[in-house]
Image (spheres, helix red, strand yellow):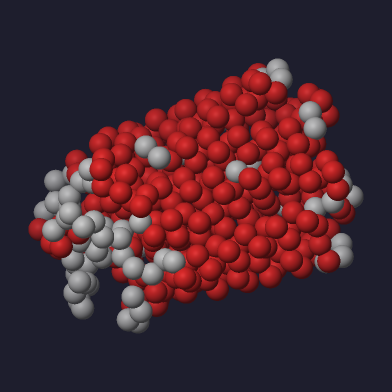
Amino acid sequence: MASDTKPHKPRRIARIQIIAVSILSIAGVINYIDRGSLAIANTTIRADIGISATRMGVLLSIFSLSYAISQLPMGILLDRFGERLVLGAGMFLWSLTQAATGLVRGFASFVGARVGLAVGESPFVVSSVKTVNDWFDVRDRATPMGIVNASTTLGQAVAPPILTVTMLAFGWRGMFMLIGIPGLVLSIAWFALYRDRRKVSLNSSELAYLEASGRRGGSVRISFSQWLGLFRLRTVWGMMLGFGGINYTVWLYMSWMPNYLEAEHHVSVARTGMLAMIPFSCGAVGMLLSGIIADLLVRNGVSPINSHRTLLVIGMTCSAASTLLVPYVPGATAAAFAIGMALFFTYLAGNSGWGLVQSIAPRGDVGAVAAIQNFGSFVCASFAPVITGWLLDRTHSFHLTLVICSMVSILGALSYLLIVKNPIVFADRHPAEAGFD
C-alpha cells in the first residue's frame, strides 16, 4: 500500500525520468508517422502498382496482424534483456525497414516490408509501459504515460501534412526512404542515454521514492507456465477484447480516413493532408487529459483500477456515439472534427487501458500482461482495414464500416464493465510476492 506522504524525488531519478519520457515521446511521434505512411500514400500506390482496395486493406491488416503476433514474446524478451536493448533494436529495425519500403516492386515485396515494420515497432508500447512502471511512483505514472501516448497521436496528427508534402515533392518511394532516417538516429540516442532500472545502483533516497507505493525491487520473474496461465484468466481475456475495441477504432481511422475524406467529400490529396491533422490532434488532447484525470482521481482516494475502468467505459461509449454521427456530418472540415470527437474519446480511454495494466497486474508481470493485451487488441484491429477495403470494393461507401466500428467499441466498453474487475493473481505465488501497486 502506498504511504500517505510522498517522499522527495531525487535529482538523478528526475533526470532519468526526463530522458526516458523525452526519448519515448520522440519515438512515439516517429513511430506513428512511419505507421501512417501507407494510409497517406494509399490512393497513389494503388494507382501506381495497380492493386484493389481489398488488397490495400490486406496490406494494412498485414501490419496489425504481424504486430499482434510479435507482441507475444515481448514481455519475456523485455524481462530477460531489458528495454534498452529490445526497444533500441526495434527502433533500428523498423526505421531500416521503412527506408527499404521505397524499393518495393509489387504486392509480395510490400507484404514483406509491412511485416518487417510491424516486428520492429512491436516493442515500443510495452517498453514504454515497463519504463514508466520502473521509474515512476504509482501516483505519478498516468501523466507520463499520457505524455508518451499523446506523442503517438501527435505523430498521427503531424503525419498527414509531413507525409503529403514529402510525397508530392519526392514521390511515394522517396517519402518512405526519407522518413526512415530519424528513427535510425533516435535508436542510437536511446542506446547511449537510457539505462534499465536493474542496471542502475540506487541509493536509499532513490529507493525510498520508487518504493513509496509499496513496490520492491525483488519482484518475482514470471515463469513460462505462469505466462501460459495468463491466457486462462477471465480478466486477461476481458482486457484483450476491451482494448481490441480501442485499437479497431484507431486502426480504422488511421488506415482509411484520408481515403474517406477524398472519396466521400471529394477533397484533394494536398487538402486531405491538412484536414487529417484535426482528428488526431483531438486524440492527442484526449490522451493527455486522460492521464491528468486518472492521477487526480487516484490522489483523491479512488483506486487505480476503478479510475481507469471508469475512463475506459465512458470514453469508449462516447467514441461509439461519435462514430455513428460521422457519415451524417456535412462538409469535409466538419467531418474531420466529428472523427476528431470519436478519436478524442477513444484515446481518453486508450491511455487508461495501459494504466489499468499497471494497476491490475502483479509488478513483475506488467510487461507480460501489457504484451498479451496488445496482442489480443491488434488481432481485433487487423480486421478493420481489410473489412473496410472489402466493403468499399462492393458498396463504394464507408457507412457500414463506421456502424461496425461503433458496435466493436460498445462491445469493448461492455468487456471492461462486465469482465475486467479483479486483479490478476497467480494461485501458485505467495501473496508477498504478488506486489500490486
Residue 33 in percent (x, y) is at 60, 42
Q: Which residue lies furthest to the bottom in this view?
A: 300
Relative to 289, does residue 239 appear above or below in the rendering? Answer: above
The answer to whether 76 appears left or right of 385 in the picture is left
The percent coordinates of residue 363 (x first, y second) are 25, 56
| Residue at image coords 63%, 71% | 318
Quadrant containing the C terminus in the rendered view: bottom left
- Return the residue nearer the eye: 142 or 412: 412
- Quarter location, residue 308: bottom left
Quadrant of image for the N terminus: bottom left
For image coordinates 39% across by 56% down, the residue present is 236
* 429 versus 119 height, above or below: below
| Residue placed furthest toward the front | 232
Query: Where in the figure is residue 417, as x and y percent of width and height?
Result: 48, 71
Viewer-nearest residue: 254 or 154: 254
Query: What residue lies at 59% left-to-right and 30% top-to-bottom?
Result: 114
320 to the left or right of 302: right
Name of the residue lying farthest toward the right: 266
Q: Which residue is drawn at 44% across and 66% down?
A: 419
